[in-house]
Amino acid sequence: MLDRFLEAVGRVNGAINSVVWGWPMIILILMTGLLLSVRTRFLQVRRFKESLGTTILPTVKGLGKKQKKKTAEGSVSQFEAFSAAISGTVGTGNIVGVISAILTGGPGAVLWMWISAFFGMVTNYSENVLGLYFRKKNHNGELSGGPFYYIAYGLKWRWLAYVAAVFCLLASVGMSGVQTNKITGTVTEALDKAVGLEDPGVIKLIVGAVVAAAAGVIIIGGIKRIGRVASMLVPFMSLVFITLSLIAIGMHIQNVPGAFGMIFSKAFTFEAAGGGVLGYTFATVIRKGMARGVFSNEAGLGSSVIAHSASETKEPVKQGLWGVFEVFLDTFVICTMTSLTFLTTFDISSLTGKEDDAAMAIEMFETNFGSFGVIVYSIIMPLFAFTSILAWSYYGEKAVEFLFRKVGVKGREATVKVFKAGYIVLILLSTFITGDLIWEIDDTFNGLMALPNLICLIALSGLVARITKNYFDRRRGIKAPPMLSAYPDLNEEFAAEIENAPVN
């Protein structure tokens, strides 16, 4: 009976997904990124060096040094906000998702990931700018922001803000399912290779229970605990993965030119993996690349801005520059490492396109590093997925908080607690859903979440340009009232806090 139900869900979702991720959405994502690029004068190119110089480089230099000041109550540091946001984007989508895109859309899908990421850098920047500009303080003094806030108070379409919050809630549940499903799949696959398993279902259930329990402990602590955990795990996981990928690519260095050749040549042909045995249309290649690109870096979804909005920084543009680096790291670095490792390790012409993405991911590590690769993959992959679960729990929490913000403090706190409990239970239940179906469902949820956000970004693109100009004008010494918040009281409060501090 469960199989019939899941089959019916798959059919319904497939029909919705074909509409959500059809040409209109693809064009909307690209045109939004292009419009924002033009209005900010291609900030992702002009200010890329500055985005590194004011974000990750100072953070790396400061590692090991004692923090001089405590983070303000109700907020997290810029790096913790970034870590929480990047933990939501750097997950199974960067490894399993990229392999899935190549298997189902061919190597050419990678080029469309890059294209979506190029425009996604400024899209993510714009989301962060608007998120911080329209964020509010709740009764605990905690800063809350996201697409529903700038849709409600910037665009002033309250009904669309509620729609965006509902879609965010659905996407958070779907994302937790994807990540949990891949955690259980990875661990089960590794154990099966090592000792052989008679009943993988029992192992999946045990792993799901452990993940749910561990997530529950951290989720209860809110954004501060999520930020601290993410800031410790994300840099470690990313460095290990990038290092191993570079070694694997170096082992097959002779195949690198061919890999790039396939990425560019197959982006505009009808062939997918297997030399076109299961040939896909040009539209499918684009759709797979765009969908997986957005799934990976989340630019356009309006999700990561929810974490960025909790940052202690008062300057929207400063946190926006973290968004530029976030997409760059996620797609141009980590997803590219996955793509090149996969394409240089395997003979694509021998693949049929029916291979399991999770199994191919672990085989990629095993082929290059033997049992050591399986062990490392079995550690970093679940950690990647686990931090994504944590981040999306916070996104769902903030969506619930927005939806029930008028029911009073006690009512809102009660609904948030119910969501957290339900989220943890759903982590466990998602172990029973097939991998392909959970990917497809969350692809649909992501597309639905992106739609209202993209509409708002287009409508408020002029405001993004003005806030950006205001910041860099003040950086050049031009006297102008700072644009820090859409609300006069908060703008005055933030301005007073930075009045005697140099603008960086």
Image: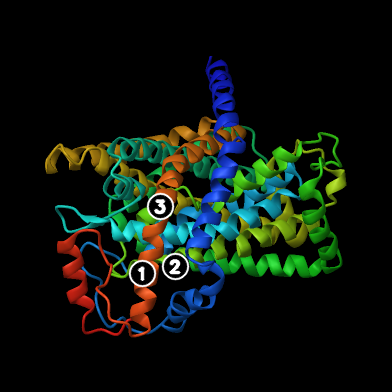
Q: Secondary structure at mark 1?
A: helix
Local crowd at mark 2 within 10 Å, few (<14), some, or many (≥20)? many
Front one among 146 and 463: 463
Q: CA distance from mark 2 to mark 1?
A: 8 Å
Local crowd at mark 3 within 10 Å, few (<14), some, or many (≥20)? many
Q: Residue at position x 65%, y 70% from top?
A: 243
Identified by mark 2, the residue type is Trp
Identified by mark 3, the residue type is Ala
For marks 2 and 1, the one nearer the N-term is 1
Position above or below: 102 against 251: above
Q: Secondary structure at mark 2?
A: helix
Q: CA distance from mark 1 to mark 3?
A: 15 Å
In the image, residue 407 lies at what x, y percent?
15, 36
The answer to which quarter of the image holds residue 26 is top right
Identified by mark 1, the residue type is Gln
Q: Which mark is residue 78?
A: 1
Front one among 384 and 397: 397
Q: Residue at position x 60%, y 53% from top?
A: 116
- Looking at the image, residue 467 sits to the left or right of residue 455; the answer is left
- Looking at the image, residue 251 sits to the left or right of residue 16; the answer is right
**Label 2 sits on residue:** 322
Position above or below: 2 against 106: above
In the image, residue 57 lies at what x, y percent?
48, 79
Position above or below: 476 against 459: below
For marks 1 and 3, the one nearer the N-term is 1
Q: Which mark is residue 391?
A: 3
Q: Are marks 2 and 1 in contact (CB under 8 Å)?
A: yes
In the image, residue 452 lies at what x, y percent?
42, 41
